[in-house]
Image (cartoon, rainbow, N blue to C red):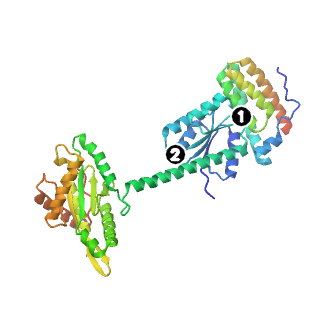
Amino acid sequence: MATLPSILIAEDDPISGRILERNLKSWGYEVAIAKNGNQAWEVLRGPTTRLALLDWMMPGAEGPELCRRIRALNKPGYTYIILLTSRDSTKDIIDGLEAGADDFMTKPVNFAELRARLQTGGRIIALEDKLLESQKRLFELATRDSLTGIWNRATILRFLEDEMAHCDRGGEYSLSLILIDVDYFKKINDTYGHQVGDKVLSKVTAILEKNIRPYDKVGRYGGDEFLIVLPNCSLYHVAVVAERLRSAVEKIKIRIEGESLNLSLSLGCASSECFRRPNSDRMIKESDGALYKAKQAGRNRVGLCAELKTPKDAGQIKDKESKDNKKKGTPRAPEQK
Amino acid sequence: MLPNKNEESPPLNRAEALERVGDDESFLEELLTIYHEEFAEKSPALAEALANGDAKAVREIGHYLKGASANLSLPGLQAAAWTIEKSGAESKIEDAKAAYRVLLSEYERLKKFLGK
C-alpha cells in the first residue's frame, strides 16, 4: 500500500481540530496541527506537507491568504488545499478557489465526503510526482551523455555561454576552459574494441570529475574529447588543474586480458583573461589551438593558449605542482584567484 | 427575550455527534469537556464585547461558538451563535445581546441534559 502524504490541519477551534486529527489518523495519514494562520504558514512553506485542510477564519493569516501565499511561493511539489468553512455562498466558493484552494468543504464536515476528497487530492499529487519524475528523466536524456553520464556537448556549450555573461561585466573575473583529448584513443578502439574504448572514457570521466571543483562543469565534447568549464579561474590556475588531471590519468592502468593499458591525456587551456573581448567561440578556438600544440609537442602534456609564453609558464606550473604534491601527498584544487 | 424555539428538542443530537466521532463515547465526552472549557472562556469575552459595542469581536466569538457547537451537533447553541455572528457582522448589537441570552439559556439546558 502506498504511503499517504502528510497532511496539515490548520484549525483554531480545538474541537474541530481534534475530530479532524482523529479521523485522519485513523485513515492512515500523518498529521501536523496548526492552531493559527502563522503556525500553518511555517508548516506549509516546508517541503513535507502536500495536503492541507485550512480553516477559512483563523487568527494570524486566514485560509484564503495562506492559499495565495503558497501559490506565490511556487515551491517544488504541489500542495493540494481544501478550505474548510461555514461560508457556502457562490461568491465565497469563488473567492476561495480564486485564492488558490483546490477544493472547498462546509463545516461541520461530512467525514465520508472528506475522505473521498482527500483521495482525490492524493491522486493529483501522485500524478504530479509522476510528471515531475518524467520531466527529470527527459532532462537527463536531453542534457547528459549516455555513456559517461556527464553533460553532453550542447549542454556544456550552454554552460559556457552562460558563464561568458559574467566576463562581459568586466572586472577581475576570469573564466577558463580545458579541452581534453585521450591520447591514441583511436588506436585503443581499433586494437581492443569499442567496449574497451567505452571503459577508457568512463575511467577518464571519473578522474576528471574527481579532480575539479564542485562548481566546474565537465562535458563530453566529441568522441574522445572532453571540455571543462571553470568559472572564476585564471590561466595560471587552469594550468595547475590541467596538470593535475594529466598527472592523475597518467598514473592509472587498465587491465585488459592480462595486459596493462597505460593512458594519457593531452590538454589545451584558455582563459578569458588572455583576450580583450573574450567570447565562447574564441575561447574554444584558443583551447583547441593549445591542445593541438600539446599534441604536436608529443602528447601527454598541457598546452596553454597562444597569448602566454607556453613552454616556460607550463614548466613553472608543472614544477610547482610536483612540489605541492611532494609536500601535501595528494593533488588538490588550487585556491581561486 | 426571544422565544427559544429549541426547548422541545434535545440540546445535543447524540446520534449525529457520535457518527462524527466514530461512535466513540469517550471521545465525545472528551470533546464536550473541551466545549465547556471553551464556553467558559468565550462567554465572558462575548459579554464584554457586547457591553463595549465591539461588533467585530462579537462576530468573531459568535463565529467560533457556532463552529464548535455545529461540530458537536448542539443545534440550539449553534443557532444562537449564528445569530450572534450575523448580528455582529451587521453591527446590530441589541440583536446580538438578545441572541446571547438565548445562547446562555441553551447552554444551561445542555448542562442539565448532560447532568452537569
Query: Is A312 in front, or is A16?
Result: A312
Left or right, A212 with respect to B54, comes to left
Image location of residue A295, percent across then percent down: 17, 64
- Residue at the (59%, 51%) spot, across then down: A5
> Which of the numbered marks, if any, corresponds to residue A278?
none
- Residue at the (26%, 45%) spot, across then down: A164
Query: Is A245 in front, or is B8?
Result: A245
Left or right, A77 with respect to A151, comes to right
Residue B111, by quadrant, is: top right
Query: Is B57 in front, or is A291?
Result: A291
Image location of residue B83, percent across then percent down: 75, 25
| Amino acid type at image mark 2 | Gly
Question: Under tag 1, what secondary structure?
Answer: helix
Pinpoint the chain carrying mark 1. B
> Which of the numbered marks, if any, corresponds to residue A46?
2
Against B13, residue A255 (above or below) is below
Pinpoint the chain carrying mark 2. A
**Residue density around tag 1, few if under 14, some if 14–19, many if 20 or more, within 10 Å:** many
Q: Which residue is mark 1?
A: B67
- The span from disc 1 to disc 2 (Cα, nearest Å) is 29 Å
- Residue at the (83%, 42%) spot, across then down: B15
Question: Under tag 2, what secondary structure?
Answer: loop
| Amino acid type at image mark 1 | Gly
Image location of residue A153, percent across then percent down: 31, 55
Against A104, residue A317 (above or below) is below
Judged from this view, the residue extending furthest toward the right is B8
Residues at circles 1 and 2 in contact by the CB criterion of under 8 Å: no
